[in-house]
Image (cartoon, grey):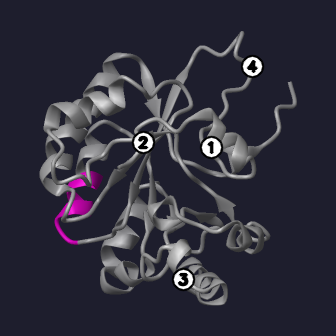
Amino acid sequence: MYLIKTPQFIRKTFPGFIWNIETQNEKVKKDKDIYLTFDDGPVEDVTPFVLDLLQEYEAKATFFCVGENIDNNPQIFADLQEQGHAVGSHSYNHLSGWATDNNDYVSNVTKAAELSSSNLFRPPYGRIKPSQAKVIQKDFKIIMWDVLSGDFDPKITEEKCYDNVVSNAHDGSIVVFHDSHKSFPILKKVLPKVLDYYSQAGYNFKSITEDCFAPNLN
């Protein structure tokens, strides 16, 4: 079981995590921004497909990369950076924090971060112990999400996955997709429709950068 829309009580339980990108100057802000993110890559076939599609829509995104996949696919990793997308780490071996010793987990996260050269981190499965988060947050921003597409679910339909996103994602939303072979059968059908929907609705597709966390000085 998984939640499509992250409830407020979970966000309040972990206030130090980033669940969405708060829009600043709401009363005068005219642009609408959405933050598409992709977990588990880079991998052959799937990540290049995503990159080509994003380029078609002049969209930027954030890729939370598994360190082992960076080692195995260095050119694809270089390509996504050269195309202006942001990167974050997703641990080196896609570890669940709940099932991993604290020292081993932090070491694994650090190893992946050295490869990605990023201070953004998303815990695989969203599973991280408070004791692990306390250590990791000293050096990293923990990026979660407010909308989960469900593309990883082998039982999900194309229509349901699409509806999960467009019925829940709005200005400032962080949306999770997966550039993995497991998710590809659904991703390749749904992602073009999501990009088209939000493009038609006047949204900008942005990556998560340090500018997202800068204080509003206006």
Q: Is residue 75 left or right of residue 123?
A: left
Disc 2 is placed on an element classified as loop
Residue type highlighted by circle 1: Ile
- Which residue position is annotated with label 4? 25
- Report if the CB atoms under discs 4 and 2 are less than 8 Å apart: no
Disc 1 is placed on an element classified as helix
Say whether residue 109 is visible: yes
Query: What's the magenta region?
Result: 44-51
- Which residue position is annotated with label 3? 100
- Which residue position is annotated with label 2? 3
Looking at the image, residue 160 lies above or below residue 149: above
**Mark before the other along the chain sequence, 1 or 3:** 1
Q: Residues within 10 Å of mark 4 (few under 14, many from 20)?
A: few
Residue type highlighted by circle 3: Thr
From the top left corner, tell me how far across and down residue 96 is, in percent: 48, 73
Looking at the image, residue 213 lies above or below residue 173: below
Residue type highlighted by circle 4: Asn
Q: Is residue 130 left or right of residue 205?
A: right
- Which residue position is annotated with label 1? 10
- Report if the CB atoms under discs 2 and 1 are less than 8 Å apart: yes
Is 163 one of the magenta-colored residues? no
From the top left corner, tell me how far across and down residue 120 is, in percent: 61, 62
**Mark before the other along the chain sequence, 2 or 3:** 2
* CA distance separating discs 1 and 3: 22 Å
